[in-house]
């Protein structure tokens, strides 16, 4: 029982504070519990992060005021994980802990969503006697007793006897029930009843006999089932990775352990969850951000109380309060949606999964058809064990892939620069056979920009340095970054030279129109952020497509994920250059992943598949490797390039962005910070490189100018300690400038 505790607060306060614990609170004041404590002139909720820290003598400490939780919310391994987050991602410990608990869990008491139930403490005979001896004028009491007798003699004793039900049936008030409780006839209790709600029962699925390579993968992992061991499971889509995960988890459950499965947010469709529920039933808890507060609260507590043993969730599920962790699975580990965005700390859940496995002493399996170069590198240097599934379980007929040169097509007719002649005839063939096609274009709206035919300047968002896209249906210009919208009122003239601007390029809406005119008979569905803004819309489109309610599905990257459609025999990538031309050292890797994935969509059933990849730069190595399925070739070349420049995975990037409404202020702060830290640079061990102050990309967003410094290093924590921590003051929001630190940006 601690006499003193260290408290971390959620606001980004750099340090934690020591308080004394009044005797009455000592029993509950354990690490991981939240308390109310005085801070400055107010009271705040903070986390106990240490018990009995060293207290300098003679200092009079303030008392904590009360306990917020009945038991610790953060387990000891999770507390160590939070410490790692605060060191590595350079944030306050309280700020790190804030993302460990979902908002509804932080804001609501643990009994939120629980129900009051009644337990009968007497047997049937005693109840009958009591009833007979109760005078008629105590009709309320008699009513209650009668209800208890009915309940006691009913066959259904399993479902909870709700207090609310009793009140209604006995037509009585709570006070009458309480008086019987005092008399020892019944007892009321607050309970969490999962069975009151549908746990989303899924059809049970029977485990298939594993293939030899699946068996090998499972047994390699199980050999290390009680120690920290990271694995990279590389296997094409459909090679049976999920089945491998299911077997590993099953073994963990047999050993009374638990499992955490991370899947990218977008993949959290009911099908994914059903696959796990089908195998493990109500032992599964699902956590994701689209759930209602009540649902997330309930799922979290099911996990905390040990009722759920397998957690399937998006990135924040890496912080699930499971104990006795037996394994962690990260599916589609290369996905950038594992990176936290919006609010610091900008953690990567994939990397934290490995760290958590280390702290919990269990294996972690990172699975992907196109693993990130970071993970591949870790496998190459022996940090991770590489497991491979080389063929599809249900081998389909061959996939024929073509790479089309759009330059040639555009010379024939401009529309062929969007749908090439090969793609057009492939679509016709596909439709004639009553099969389905998926077309991919990573650009929503009607046209992506209005451009000046003279000087190539384009019309930009007033709040951001990005071009405005034209959305025809709503007749608006829209900024895809900040959401700014204004009515489309042409003509527009060039901000630089005054020439009239022209719509340029194709977004999904415009391609949809083109498809209607090229294939008037075809039924076409579109899936992008504009058609999926409502909850469930995403799911609805996919279900309709699976039921063949339309023939062609046109969409942005949303459709490039691991979805299974047996009747899809054609896939087209309309413009592979969009991701290739982004000014980012990862653009090649992204394009390879994207094309590989999109191409992997076709021919998943028994029918032969075909894919067409269109590009204005068909000579690019990345594209050639992707259409040939040459993963080794791509990795070899890309690794060589990255090594030469000392880019990740051969270093880590620490990005520091200074933002301000005034460009000069942002620039000056960045410069000042850079100059200040320079003198400490010689003390940094390992590889180190620091850029000059540069414009960020975009250089202006949400009405703020942005300047950045990139640091590349092999030792992130050393940089944090020597360069960031001593100059913390310069990183604080001062006079209209904010600094944002992103370690390992994606
Ligand atoms: P991935 O996760 O790599 O995409 P899945 O595990 O989803 O692969 O497997 C693809 C399909 O093959 C699924 O329909 C799955 O049920 C089936 N499958 C997986 N392993 C086997 C097996 N050993 N025997 C028969 N079918 C299997
Ligand atoms: Zn904008």
Image (cartoon, grey):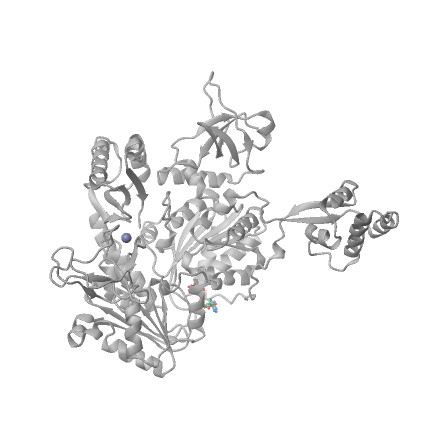
Q: Given the current orientation, which residue lies at the most extreme bottom position?
A: 432
Asked which quadrant contains residue 158, the reply is bottom right
> Horizontal and vertical percent for residue 190?
65, 46
Asked which quadrant contains residue 28, the reply is top right
Q: Look at the picture and state if 682 lies above or below 223.
A: above
Viewer-side residue, 94 vs 570: 94
Viewer-side residue, 276 vs 226: 276
Q: Look at the picture and state if 610 lies above or below 229.
A: below
- The residue at 71%/54% (across/down) is 168
Q: Is residue 713 visible?
A: no
Screen quadrant of the N terminus: top right
- The residue at 48%/65% (across/down) is 210
Q: Look at the picture and state if 393 lies above or below 648.
A: below
Viewer-side residue, 256 vs 487: 487
> Horizontal and vertical percent for residue 586?
26, 54
Q: Given the current orientation, which residue lies at the most extreme top position?
A: 58
- The residue at 24%/62% (across/down) is 489
> Horizontal and vertical percent for residue 471?
29, 64
Q: In this rendering, would 201 be left or right of 431?
A: right
> Horizontal and vertical percent for residue 628?
27, 68
Asked which quadrant contains residue 448, the reply is bottom left
**Total numbered circles:** 0
Q: Look at the picture and state if 202 lies above or below 522.
A: above
Q: Is residue 54 visible?
A: yes
């Amino acid at each position: 029982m601690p006499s003193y505790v260290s408290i971390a607060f959620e606001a980004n306060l750099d340090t934690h504070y020591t308080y004394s614990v009044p005797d009455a609170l000592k029993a509950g004041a354990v690490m991981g519990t939240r308390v109310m404590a005085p801070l400055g002139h107010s009271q705040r909720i903070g986390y106990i992060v240490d018990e009995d820290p060293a207290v300098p003598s003679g200092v009079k400490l303030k008392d904590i005021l009360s306990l917020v939780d009945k038991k610790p919310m953060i387990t000891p391994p999770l507390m160590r994980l939070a410490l790692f987050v605060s060191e590595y991602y350079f944030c306050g410990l309280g700020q790190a802990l804030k993302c460990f608990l979902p908002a509804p869990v932080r804001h609501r008491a643990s009994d939120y969503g629980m129900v009051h139930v009644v337990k009968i403490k007497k047997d049937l005979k005693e109840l009958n006697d009591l009833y007979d001896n109760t005078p008629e004028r105590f009709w309320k009491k008699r009513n209650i007793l009668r209800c208890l007798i009915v309940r006691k003699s009913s066959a259904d004793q399993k479902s909870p006897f709700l207090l609310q039900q009793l009140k209604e049936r006995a037509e009585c008030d709570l006070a009458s029930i309480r008086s019987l409780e005092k008399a020892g006839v019944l007892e009321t209790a607050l309970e969490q009843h999962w069975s009151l709600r549908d746990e989303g029962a899924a059809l049970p699925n029977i485990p298939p006999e594993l293939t030899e390579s699946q068996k090998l993968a499972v047994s390699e992992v199980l050999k290390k089932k009680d120690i920290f061991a990271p694995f990279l499971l590389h296997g094409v889509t459909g090679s049976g990775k999920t089945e491998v995960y299911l077997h590993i988890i099953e073994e963990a459950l047999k050993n009374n352990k638990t499992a955490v499965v991370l899947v990218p947010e977008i993949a959290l469709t009911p099908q994914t969850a059903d696959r796990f529920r089908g195998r493990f039933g109500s032992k599964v808890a699902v956590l994701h951000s689209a759930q209602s507060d009540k649902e997330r609260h309930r799922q979290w507590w099911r996990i905390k109380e040990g009722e759920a043993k397998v957690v399937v969730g998006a990135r924040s599920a890496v912080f699930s309060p499971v104990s006795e962790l037996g394994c962690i699975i990260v599916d589609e580990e290369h996905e950038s949606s594992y990176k936290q965005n919006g609010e610091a700390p900008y953690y990567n859940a994939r990397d934290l999964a490995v760290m958590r496995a280390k702290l919990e002493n269990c294996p972690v399996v990172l699975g992907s058809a196109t693993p990130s170069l970071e993970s591949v590198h870790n496998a190459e240097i022996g940090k991770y064990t590489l497991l491979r599934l080389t063929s599809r379980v249900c081998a389909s007929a061959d996939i024929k892939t073509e790479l089309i040169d759009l330059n040639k097509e555009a010379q024939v007719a401009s529309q062929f620069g969007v749908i090439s002649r090969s793609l057009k005839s492939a679509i016709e063939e596909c439709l004639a056979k009553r099969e389905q096609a998926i077309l991919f274009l990573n650009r929503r709206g009607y046209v992506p920009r209005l451009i000046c035919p003279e000087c190539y300047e384009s019309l930009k968002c007033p709040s951001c340095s990005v071009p405005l896209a034209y959305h025809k249906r709503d007749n608006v210009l829209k900024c895809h970054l900040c959401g700014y919208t204004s009515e489309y009122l042409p003509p527009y003239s060039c901000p630089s030279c005054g020439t009239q601007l022209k719509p340029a390029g194709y977004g999904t809406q415009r391609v949809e129109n083109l498809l209607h005119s090229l294939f008037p008979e075809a039924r076409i569905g579109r899936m992008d952020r504009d058609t999926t803004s409502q909850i469930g819309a995403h799911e609805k489109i996919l279900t309709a497509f699976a039921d063949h309610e339309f023939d062609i599905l046109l969409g942005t990257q949303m459709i490039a994920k691991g979805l299974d459609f047996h009747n899809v025999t054609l896939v087209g990538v309309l413009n592979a250059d969009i991701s290739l031309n982004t000014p980012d050292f990862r653009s090649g890797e992204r394009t390879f992943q994207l094309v590989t994935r999109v191409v992997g969509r076709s021919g998943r059933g028994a029918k032969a598949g075909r894919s067409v990849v269109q590009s204005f730069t068909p000579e690019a190595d990345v594209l050639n490797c992707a259409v040939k399925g040459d993963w080794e070739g791509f990795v070899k070349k890309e690794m060589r390039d990255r090594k030469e420049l000392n880019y990740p995975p051969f270093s880590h990037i620490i990005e520091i962005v200074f933002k301000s409404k005034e460009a000069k202020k942002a620039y000056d702060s960045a410069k000042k910070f850079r100059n200040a830290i320079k003198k400490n640079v010689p003390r940094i061990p390992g590889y180190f490189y620091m850029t000059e102050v540069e414009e960020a990309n975009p250089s202006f967003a949400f009405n703020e100018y942005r300047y950045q410094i990139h640091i590349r290093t092999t030792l992130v924590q050393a940089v944090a300690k020597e360069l960031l921590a001593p100059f913390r003051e310069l990183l604080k929001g001062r006079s209209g400038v904010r600094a944002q630190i992103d370690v390992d940006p994606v």
